[in-house]
Image: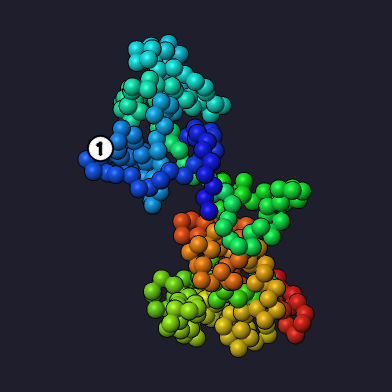
Amino acid sequence: MFSRLKTLVIWTSVVVLSLIATDIPRSLAQSVTLNGRHFFKSNGKWYAEDKSMVYEVEGDIITVKFKPDVTSVQIENYNSARGFTILRRNILGYYDIKIPVTTDPMESVQQYQTSGLVEIAHPNMYGTAFGESDDPLFSDQWNLHDPASDHDIDAPQAWDFSVGSSSVVIAIIDAGVWFTHWDLDGNIWQNLGEDADGDGRTLEWNSDSSAVILDPDDLDGIDDDDFDNDPTTYIDDLIGWDYHPCGRDVYGSSDLRDDRSHGTRCAGIAAAQTNNYEYLEDQWQYVGVAGVAGGWYDSTPGCRIMSIDVFEHGNIRGHQ
């Protein structure tokens, strides 16, 4: 679950913050778009929207960066005429400006933007700290979080900065990956170069939506990645590759779904879907752990898992 800490975020230099409730009345709300983000005002307060999240705008502090040729006299004259006070300046040249509590922060930002003095002006907001995962076995993952002895990697602190990214692909070079696992299926890498039917995926749910399967329409026996022009590709390498001598794909006769369970464990450590217990509570026995970079379930996607099988007859088959 999201932890409920409340730390003021300075937009330019301070880390994030606390969850703000999203059930805010918006009738007769004033709205504005600023720096590509939508803001609305309700019951005297401003809020910023980001996807499904809503963040409260700090009412008496804004942040600006002045143009290089602006003098200290110009800054002082502008601020003193409006009752503004400089609180601090960081090494990147951003200033936190204290404004009177009776002053509208969004108006102050817009006035700064049109003053000709600044490169950028922006309000400060209360944001989200991911905190600890709700996965039922997270308390046993001492390698991620062990406050007693601190023999851990401080995963909750790292998650406040990043929980992984779907643009990052992690190759699990092992005995394959059980890609139908409830804690992994949402983070399996899909090679869209092999998406023969053009539906935007190489994995799909089976007929009763109980498990993911390789898209049968993509298993066409053709190297859709164009092997003739790209020798690094293979026929039907939908989610990885099995390097057994038969040269089959992950769901070929060698079946890369990890009969040893070792590659699956490694994949889970790296990028099991995190914080997904409350969403899949009826399947809790399958969604017990948190991955280091598995995203934050239903809000932020995690790193993608590529399945690479290098085992053969109990031995590791070496490949470059």
Q: Residue at x 42, y 32 (%)?
A: 58
Image quadrant where residue 67 sits: top left
Residue 159 to residue 184: above or below:
above
Q: Residue at x 46, y 71 (%)?
A: 192
The residue singled out by tag 1 in the image is 30
On the image, the x and y values in percent for residue 55 come to 41, 42
Image quadrant where residue 183 sits: bottom right
Position of 310 with respect to 293 (left or right) is: right
On the image, the x and y values in percent for residue 27 come to 23, 43
State the residue in front, 95 or 30: 30
User: Residue lying farthest left?
Assistant: 28
Position of 210 with respect to 267 (left or right) is: left
Label 1 Cα neighbours within 10 Å, binned few <14 / some 14-19 / many ≥20: few
On the image, the x and y values in percent for residue 145 come to 68, 52
State the residue in front, 117 or 271: 271
Q: Amino acid at mark 1?
A: Gln
